[in-house]
Amino acid sequence: MLRKSLLPLLALALPAFAYEPITLPVIPSDPAIEKKVSETLSRMTLDEKIGQMTQIQLDILGENGPDGFRLVQAKLDTIFGVYKVGSILNAPYSYCLDAEAWNVVIPQIQEASMKYMGIPCIYGLDQNHGTTYTNGGTLFPQNLNVAASFNTEIARRAAEITAYETRASDCPWTFSPTLDLARDPRWPRFWENYGEDPLVNALMGAAAVRGFQGDDPNHIDGNHIAVSVKHFMGYGVPFSGKDRTPAHISPSDLREKHFAPYLEAIKNGALTVMVNSSSINGTPVHADWTLLTKWLKNDLQWDGLIVTDWADINNLYTREKVARDKKDAIRIAINAGIDMAMEPYKVDYCTILRELVEEGSVSMERINDAAARALRLKYRLGLFDHPNTTLKEHPDHASKKFRKEALESAVETMVLLKNEDNLLPLSQGTRLLVTGPTANSMRSLNGGWSYTWQGHLTDSYAKDYNTILEALSATFGATNVSYVPTVSFNNEGHYEDETVSDFAPALKAAEKADVIVACIGENSYCETPGNLTDLHLSANQRDMVKALAKTGKPILLVINEGRPRILADIEPLAQAVVNVIIPGNFGGDALALLLSGKRNFSAKLPFTYPREINSLVTYDYKVSEEVGKMEGVYDYDARVNVQWPFGYGKSYTTFSYSNLHVDKHQFGPSDMLTVTVDITNTGSVDGKEAVLLYSSDHVASVVPDNKRLRAFDKLALMPGETRAVRFTIPASDLAFVNAQGQWALEAGDFTLSVGPLSATVSCTESYTWTTPNI
């Protein structure tokens, strides 16, 4: 049973989170670093400057030998001696290496870079939920899980540990965190983000930036790494739902929602930004001067570096058709504000860019600016003085204490969605039938970006960790757990490929079981290979649940998926539903702790779970999206109908909300609003509650959102304990971007709500800001 004492928290009492005011420049300049950048730049040739603007993948520098990947000296001499390339990325053939192997490969690269230029190389890896590309490192829950915790300390600590272990691999730069907003569940990168809400993405992203980089972006030590927040921006709402396809976003949503997480990350010191591969409203982001140069660099006085995604400059002519050829594409992208081109396969970019400079199509001012940004990044990382960091300097790499934190994180990120008749927690001695394709899969628990790009070899790499089946067997006793796969993933094929066996053995085994644990969901996938054509959970898996339901035994659905697959026809057949999302290597152990009652659920959905394919909405939908009757005519039938709403999640205990108080019932544009509310644990076991503060604008000059999350907090409470939560938000948080593209706060009434409680407050004065950001 749950302990009556307070469960350990990564953060026992969190502050109320809201946006902080902007101070320009967003990253204060360091005169000593600027002097070094200027002096180094003055000694460089044009070829060396262009080289600093170039990034290629590791495969170009080596080959596979009898003992695995190895660098080839002649290739190093060409890449660094002739083309002066400034950055390398990726794992060999997208397969992870041990830290010991990285400690061989990257120092050889640095040696060649220093030999030919006297300038260190900057190496980058997609360490997206832990040390993705370091075998043996610590893998945490994916970002969507972290968002479900509503605990930013988990985001910060996961990033901090990842940075430490990445430095053990001698890598100083990661392409993370991902802040695109997961607002279309059809999109295959849904799970890489912190859910659908701008505030959650902003504050989780900011916490991750500080975890990765530390608190001083000008002086990053040997335990931290630079970030590249991605993919700037609007990537998560492709009109087709398919990866890397165009988005159509209103100007107000672009500024107010999609830009918000990147703005907050940059305010917290993010040193680099990676660009959205596709287009917004017809303009490829890699070609958009307004977004790249004006919004990021000029408006924020930000001196960081903008890097492309994989070969994306080429897409300006091969796919987007806004350029005639590669040369034209490079001209457009560099002049738009791209500082470093991820040109993974070829170095002809260097030659072509030189031609553009010599012809006057790209100015030396633009080249000097981009090269200076690359140099500044390297100086901030201390690479000129210490090009390498070693495994020996990081003795806690892959330590038990890091793994324990990954387990704690997984526990706090699983969502209890249904628990009829208190089926959960399960008592010891309960006989379980475990079935379904995710029951015995480490691949499903980790998802993409796990050891390999698609995560397709995770079962081999992570064989020492427990699957759901293994963890349940260890917790409830092997003699009490029977396993019949029924539906399995075909790991040799496409991620959605399944094989189905006869249901009869599972139905027979159910006769001896007290509870059926049906583990459903998705196999691992990443990026475009994860596209789908039907958001419904597979017919095979739904048929499996329907057949099992006929036995009359209670069914626990364990959902293990990277995006919400529609399952409205089988949800009523289950007495309990748990969504583990993609919890990482310790997901099986965390689930067993929760199901056994040794730990309590506290996560809430950071996205809206759809019920119908034609009702894909987010919680902040426009109020006119939900329309009932047109007077005297007919029923519009435009109603929001979801499976589970944003912010939904159950617990083994209960919480009551009381004494909601707002310090000002009338306020002006410059005021601060303080909201307090008491939370009481009214149940019999200890628990944690995420407290969410929303606002709703009653009337506005543009159609208002249904509601918006304005702050959140999380606290731990023992049975009978009451604690007050205090939120302080500036009145400007209630502003919106109007039809003229300006931030505006309009006089009128707002509802502030927390849990079941609400209060009405009134703005007494309209105000419009002249600055692009507030």
Image: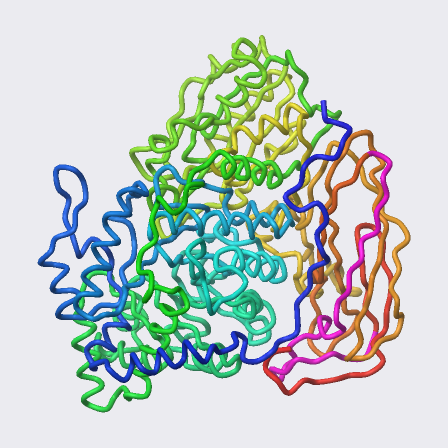
Viewer-nearest residue: 146 or 213: 213
Residue 176, compared with residue 360, is above or below; it is above
Asked which quadrant contains residue 660, the reply is bottom right
| Residue 504 picture location, percent across and down | 47, 13
Q: Quadrant of the C terminus?
A: bottom right
Asked which quadrant contains residue 96, the reply is top left
Horizontal side, residue 78 vs residue 408: left or right: left
Numbered range of the magenta stretch: 719-748
Residue 23, compared with residue 90, is above or below; it is below
Residue 507, compared with residue 197, is above or below; it is above
Instruction: Name the residue located 61 percent from the left edge and 85 percent from the top edge.
Output: 771
Asked which quadrant contains residue 502, the reply is top left
Horizontal side, residue 590 vs residue 661: left or right: left
Instruction: Name the residue located 23 percent from the left edge and 78 percent from the top edge.
Output: 324
| Residue 645 picture location, percent across and down | 67, 48
Horizontal side, residue 515 vs residue 324: left or right: right
